Image (cartoon, rainbow, N blue to C red):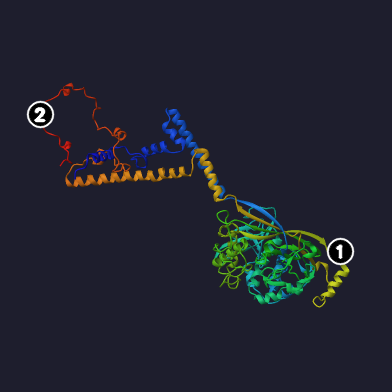
């Protein structure tokens, strides 16, 4: 169908008008259009400025402003994940914490002598061989009977050794012979032993039961430390074979340990204490454990309104090789926390009154993304073996115990048992000592991955302790006080009390101020967006709409232009390929000869004078000139020249 003249002109204009804006055919034209139409003044000045120097200055200023914006926005993002710390102090009635008390000596030595007789005999032989110590030259409180043998063959396998002049020539305690030891030498206080001033060093050798050539020699800076470490090694072997019920009977009962008790000015007794058995400290007793879902509280600060107990230590029944100090250990903790006596316990002296004042603090940290802490420990891939609320210590100990079971085939005696595991002992696991020492070495060097897996708890409670000590009982009151205490406990103590067997302990709140330390986000989303807007307005006089415009032009439109050019090239290549297959020569497409389709012009748009002026000239055509006037055309011709009327002047509406 024939096209009307007006529509022909419109179609011609659509094909030949230069395309601008988001539909520009090239990236350079798009950028020029953006700079001329954007609200960011710097970009416009780059295009309209005259002179290279002025244009270069505006380019430099614009790029500097963009760099400053990016830097400031990066700082804002980093500060967005920071937290501010606030401290709140409240005066109110405070819940009293749990107080766990243990005797430093875990088991009565008189009850343990049948189990430890062989070990004690070997230890005394070592003292006599290496240091010339014998019972006749020192005060000995009891004789060690020749009870049941608990592993003399094992003592032969891991005897105490005396190293001479930091060489590997050693004297074997059991055989008394000198021999050269092979293996890597480790010093427990530093690293590998290389030099020193002492002539003799005490230690022991541990070898892999599956490979006798894999050995490690462990030495100590002091003979006391070496003998104690060697003794504890065999001691754990023996205790791992004794049932829990038997060990509870061998340790101290509540009546044995606690002589008197007062709390908040009122008398208390063993019913207020809960027993739990600690592998290294025997029977321990927790005051206010919350076992019956009842937690005691105090409404008054001061030593008169806290916990006041007198402990019976019974120094004469201490194991002389296992412990070298007398007294008790206590730890103040929350009812849901496990008391790590061996890690953070406070020692209480005998023949002294120990006052412990407390300040209560609750802390709360923000979790991710502000800090790398955990709320409940559920996101930590380590099983909690302690049946208490999560803490970093619980995670580390549980992680090591799991690695111990996986690597050595048994569990370490000082920590809870995982499901299906049993404690290590030399009868069932002859290789466990060498495995334990090597594994512990990796743990200390953070090579097991436990320190990387375990995280701090986000919320925790802390009691800051202030300890003061005074002589107790005084010289003038010692006689009558000891007589009264002996009389009160006469049915349980069949001898006169000595002040070195007693310890006086007071635990109380110094004040009832509860300190709450919390982390709060330093910035909110509203503040972050406001800061972004301030930076954009300061450096680029830009708004949110301007940012959207930048995203549209530099990402969406630019990508569209690139993809369009690739599509046109691919289409041209395909058409040329089809022509070559058909035997036709490659021709330039009609689109390239006539221009680009302008989607801005609509079919109903009529051509205007301005659009006509923007029509491109035909290639290689001379500029149009005004022809000279032809005056002969002014002459009138005869009327016969107009006998035929033009078709387009016919009046089609005439009947």
Q: Earlier in the sequence, mark 2 or mark 1?
A: 1
Residue situated in front as seen by the camera: 452 or 577 = 577
Q: Would you identify the image quadrant in which residue 335 lies?
A: bottom right
In this rendering, is residue 383 above or below 69? below
Q: Would you identify the image quadrant in which residue 165 lies?
A: bottom right
List the residue tagged with mark 2: 640
In this rendering, is residue 195 above or below 231? above
Report the residue at 84% width, 73% height from top: 486
Residue 187 at what x, y percent from top left? 64, 57
Image-based side of 204 in relation to 568, left or right: right
Which circle marks residue 392 in the picture?
none
The residues tagged by marks 2 and 1 sit, at their Cα atoms, a distance apart of 155 Å
How many numbered badges does the structure rendering display?
A: 2
Residue 189 at what x, y percent from top left? 66, 56
Residue situated in front as seen by the camera: 140 or 454 = 454
List the residue tagged with mark 1: 474
Image-based side of 244 in relation to 559, left or right: right
> In which quadrant will I find the N terminus?
top left
């Amino acid at each position: 169908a024939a096209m009307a003249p007006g529509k022909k002109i419109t179609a011609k204009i659509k094909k030949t008008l230069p395309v601008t804006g988001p539909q520009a055919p090239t990236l350079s034209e798009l950028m020029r259009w953006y700079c001329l139409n954007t609200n960011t003044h710097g970009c416009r000045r780059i295009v309209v400025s005259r002179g290279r120097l002025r244009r270069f200055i505006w380019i430099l200023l614009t790029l500097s402003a963009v760099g400053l914006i990016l830097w400031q926005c990066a700082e804002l993002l980093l500060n967005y994940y920071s937290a501010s710390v606030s401290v709140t102090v409240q005066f109110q009635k405070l819940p009293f914490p749990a107080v766990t008390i243990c005797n430093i000596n875990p088991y009565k030595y008189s009850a343990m002598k049948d189990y430890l007789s062989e070990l004690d005999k070997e230890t005394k032989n070592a003292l006599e061989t290496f240091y010339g110590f014998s019972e006749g030259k020192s005060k000995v409180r009891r004789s060690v009977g020749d009870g049941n043998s608990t592993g003399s063959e094992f003592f032969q396998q891991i005897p105490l050794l005396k190293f001479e002049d930091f060489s590997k020539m050693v004297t074997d305690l059991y055989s008394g012979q000198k021999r050269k030891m092979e293996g890597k030498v480790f010093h427990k206080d530093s690293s590998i032993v290389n030099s020193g001033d002492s002539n003799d060093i005490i230690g022991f050798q541990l070898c892999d039961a599956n490979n006798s050539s894999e050995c490690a020699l462990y030495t100590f800076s002091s003979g006391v430390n070496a003998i104690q470490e060697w003794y504890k090694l065999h001691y754990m072997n023996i205790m791992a074979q004794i049932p829990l019920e038997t060990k509870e009977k061998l340790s101290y009962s509540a009546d044995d340990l606690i002589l008197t008790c007062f709390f908040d000015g009122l008398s208390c007794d063993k019913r207020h204490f809960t027993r739990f058995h600690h592998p290294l400290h025997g029977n321990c007793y927790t005051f206010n454990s919350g076992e019956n879902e009842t937690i005691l509280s105090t409404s008054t600060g001061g030593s008169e309104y806290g916990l006041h107990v007198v402990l019976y230590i019974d120094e004469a029944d201490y194991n002389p090789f296992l412990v070298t100090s007398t007294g008790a250990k206590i730890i103040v903790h929350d009812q849901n926390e496990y008391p790590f006596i061996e890690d953070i316990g406070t020692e209480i002296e005998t023949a002294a009154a120990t006052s412990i004042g407390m300040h209560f603090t609750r802390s709360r940290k923000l979790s991710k993304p502000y800090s790398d802490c955990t709320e409940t420990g559920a996101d930590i891939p380590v099983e909690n073996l302690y049946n208490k609320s999560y803490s970093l210590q619980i995670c580390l100990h549980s992680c090591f115990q799991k690695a111990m079971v996986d690597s050595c085939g048994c569990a370490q005696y000082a920590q809870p048992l995982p499901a299906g595991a049993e404690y290590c002992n030399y009868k069932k696991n002859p290789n466990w000592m060498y495995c334990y020492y090597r594994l512990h070495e990796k743990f200390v060097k953070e090579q097991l991955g436990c320190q990387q897996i375990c995280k701090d708890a986000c919320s925790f409670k802390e009691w800051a302790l202030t300890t003061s000590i005074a002589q107790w009982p005084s010289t003038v009151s010692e006689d009558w006080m000891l007589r009264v205490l002996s009389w009160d406990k006469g049915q349980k103590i069949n001898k006169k009390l000595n002040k070195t067997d007693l310890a006086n302990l007071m635990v109380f709140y110094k004040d009832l101020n509860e300190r709450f330390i919390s982390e709060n986000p330093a910035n909110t989303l509203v503040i972050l967006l406001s800061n972004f807007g301030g930076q954009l307005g300061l450096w680029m006089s830009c708004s949110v709409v301007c940012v959207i415009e930048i995203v549209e032009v530099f990402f969406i439109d630019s990508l569209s232009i690139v993809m369009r050019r690739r599509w046109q090239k691919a289409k041209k290549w395909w058409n040329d390929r089809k022509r070559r297959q058909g035997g036709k020569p490659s021709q330039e497409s009609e689109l390239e000869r006539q221009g680009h389709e302008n989607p801005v012009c609509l079919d109903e748009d009529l051509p205007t004078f301005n659009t006509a002026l923007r029509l491109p000239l035909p290639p290689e055509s001379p500029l149009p000139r005004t022809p000279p006037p032809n005056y002969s055309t002014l002459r009138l011709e005869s009327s016969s020249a107009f006998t035929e009327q033009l078709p387009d002047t016919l009046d089609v509406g005439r009947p």
